[in-house]
Amino acid sequence: QMQLVESGGGLVQAGESLRLSCAASDDMSKIYPMGWYRQAPGKQRELVARLTLHGDTAYVDSVKGRFTISGDNGKNTLYLQMNDLKPEDTAVYYCNPWRPGAMPVNWGQGTRVTVSS
């Protein structure tokens, strides 16, 4: 089973930026489309952004215009560029394949993002 390892989280102030990375242990193109998910304290996990192998993207409304999902298949890595971060973006962020109507079952450690006001 392919392993996915998230990194790049941290503590930042509102308005700052972070870039998250998701490194795959094998050819990530095999499991596209991919998504970035997050789980805020006391809330359900949600899909934040998704990316198809053809480069099509989609975002949850709350991050549109601020977050950008991208992938580098040569490096088997998925990215999430997060700009103009807000305290409500505070969450643990995960990457996983995206499939319509179905949340993934297995999750990695994620990477924690904390945004202070």
Image: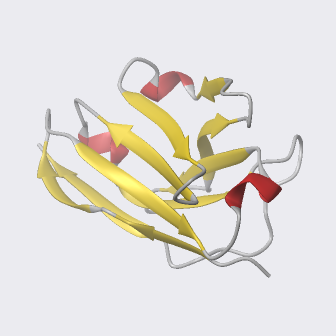
Q: Residue furthest top?
A: 65
Give the tally of numbered discs.
0
Quadrant housing residue 80: top left
Residue 4 pos. (x, y %):
60, 72
Instruction: Give the quadrant of the N terminus.
Output: bottom right
Residue 57 pos. (x, y %):
63, 26
Judge by depth and name the residue closer to the eye, 95 or 101. 95
Q: How is the image coloured?
A: secondary structure
Residue at screen point 35% across, 25% down: 66
Residue at screen point 22% across, 29% down: 84
Quadrant housing residue 8: bottom left
Residue 49 pos. (x, y %):
58, 37
Instruction: Give the quadrant of the C terminus.
Output: top left
117 lies left or right of 87: left
30 lies left or right of 110: right
Residue at screen point 44% across, 31% down: 68
Q: Residue furthest right?
A: 101
Judge by depth and name the residue closer to the eye, 90 or 21. 21
When the figure is inspected, residue 56 is found, relative to residue 17, above or below; the finding is above
Residue at screen point 46% across, 48% down: 79
